[in-house]
Image (cartoon, grey):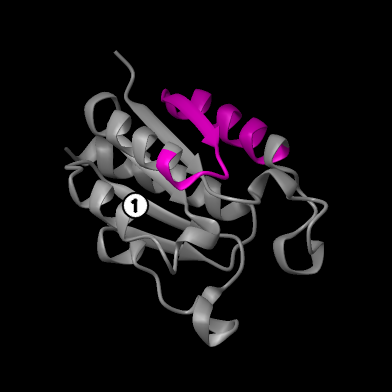
Amino acid sequence: MAATVYVLNGPNLNLLGKRQPEIYGKDTLADIEAACRALAGELGLELVFRQSNHEGQLVDWIQEARERADALIINPAGYTTTSIAILDALLACSIPILEVHLSNIHKRESFRQHSYVSLAATAVIAGCGSHGYLLALRHAARLLAAR
């Protein structure tokens, strides 16, 4: 049975390709999902790919991943710097958690430079644009193969 990787995306990522492409790139979330699905197929992984603008929905999906996934990739977007609820849900997970940011949050405004999610993350990938998702997926596969 193939390992399952959840990819969860936070608020406003549904606007990728339209919102501040000079920061977030021109790829849409659908483009990123298609690339992730293609790579997951090559790696022999099952992929669950979701986006929500609602914190509680993301918490529900993290709790679902806790039971159904072998690894979790999350781009918490605007919840990176604000959500203790997402952090607490992630801390309840015993699977690898990879945090992804399209931009390098450490070179941006000071309020974007702290991540609650990083406190639960196995690894953090920032500043690689949409390619960061593929790096995270490859790293998740590597971690799962090492188990």
Front one among 87 and 73: 87
Q: Residue at x 58, y 50 (%)?
A: 11
Left/right of residue 144 with respect to residue 42 in the rendered view = left
Residue 136 at x, y percent in the picture:
45, 49
Residue 126 at x, y percent in the picture:
51, 66
Q: Is residue 138 visible?
A: no
Residue 86 at x, y percent in the picture:
34, 52
Q: Residue at x 54, y 61 (%)?
A: 78
Left/right of residue 137 with respect to residue 13 in the rendered view = left
Per the image, is 45 magenta?
Answer: yes
Does 76 appear above or below 93? below
The residues colored magenta run 31-56
Q: Is residue 49 visible?
A: yes
Does 21 appear above or below 10? below
Q: Quadrant of residue 58?
A: top left
Left/right of residue 63 with respect to residue 139 in the rendered view = left
Q: Check disc 1 and report the residue beneath it.
A: 86
Left/right of residue 25 with respect to residue 96 in the rendered view = right
Per the image, is 115 magenta?
Answer: no
Image quadrant where one finds the C terminus = top left
Q: Residue at x 76, y 48 (%)?
A: 27
The three-letter code of the residue at mark 1 reads Ile
The residue carrying pointer 1 sits among few (fewer than 14), some (14 to 19) or many (20 or more) residues within 10 Å by Cα, namely: many
Residue 83 at x, y percent in the picture:
38, 60
Image quadrant where one finds the N terminus = top left
Q: Residue at x 52, y 31 (%)?
A: 49
Residue extending farthest to the bottom is 110
Image label count: 1
